[in-house]
Amino acid sequence: MLKRLGLSLAILLVVASAVGCAQVEPTPTPAPVETAALTITGSVESAAEWSVAALRAMPQTSTDYVGKDGDTVTYSGVALSALLDEAGCATKATTIAFVASDGYSAEGDLAEVRAVEGGIVAIADDGSLRVVLPDMSGKLQVKDLVEIQLS
């Protein structure tokens, strides 16, 4: 009987190790869905949206911004005027609002914002966006930009 128990245990160990060695095919990870990083809504021909990849594929420009501490930072991104033109900014719009991911919003006069030389939507290395408008109020330099509203 002891021999049978030993034999049974040996068979059980062989089966258990064979099951443990079986290879399981990993479930393929689906490709990430590229979501809209920026939308322009309101007084436009039709709401426009871009992913970070689409924004990076557009012509890029650089601009310098002097912060409140006096330090100059160079940002790169897409010209704000190009985005507004692509969205079909309505001529009746007079106000522009920049909205951050946390709900913070800052409004300005659309004509003044469009007149700013070097106004861009900057793209950080991590894919976050920000408005850079040299020589305009710091409140309009919205970080983590997700939406531009025209009215």
Image (cartoon, rainbow, N blue to C red):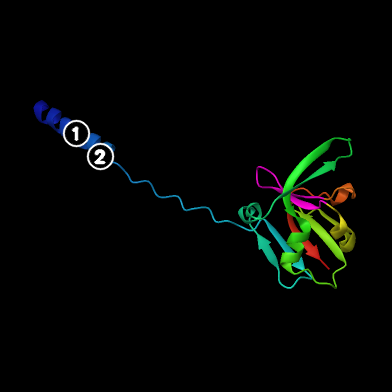
Q: Is residue 46 visible?
A: yes
Q: Give the mark nearer the N terminus: 2 vs 1.
A: 1
Q: Is residue 101 visible?
A: no
Residue 90 position within the rendered picture, expressed as x and y whole percent measured from the top left: 80, 72
Q: Which residue bears the numbered disc 1?
A: 14
Q: Which residue bears the numbered disc 2?
A: 19
Q: Quadrant of residue 87?
A: bottom right
Q: Is residue 39 above or below residue 44?
A: above
Image quarter of the N terminus: top left
- Provide the secondary structure element on which disc 1 rests: helix
Which residue shows up at 79% across the image and 63% down it? 149
Tell me where the magenta segment starts and ends, as one range. 118-132
**Which label is found at residue 51?**
none
User: Is 107 placed left or right of 84 in the picture?
Assistant: right
Q: How many marks?
A: 2
Residue 75 position within the rendered picture, expressed as x and y whole percent measured from the top left: 76, 44
Q: Quadrant of residue 46?
A: bottom right
Q: Could you say which is closer to the camera, residue 91 or residue 27?
A: 91
Which residue shows up at 89% across the image and 35% down it? 70
Residue 79 position within the rendered picture, expressed as x and y whole percent measured from the top left: 75, 55
> CA separation, marks 2 and 1?
9 Å
Residue 57 position within the rendered picture, expressed as x and y whole percent measured from the top left: 62, 54
- Type of the residue with mark 2: Val
Q: Could you say which is closer to the camera, residue 95 or residue 76?
A: 76
- Provide the secondary structure element on which disc 2 rests: helix
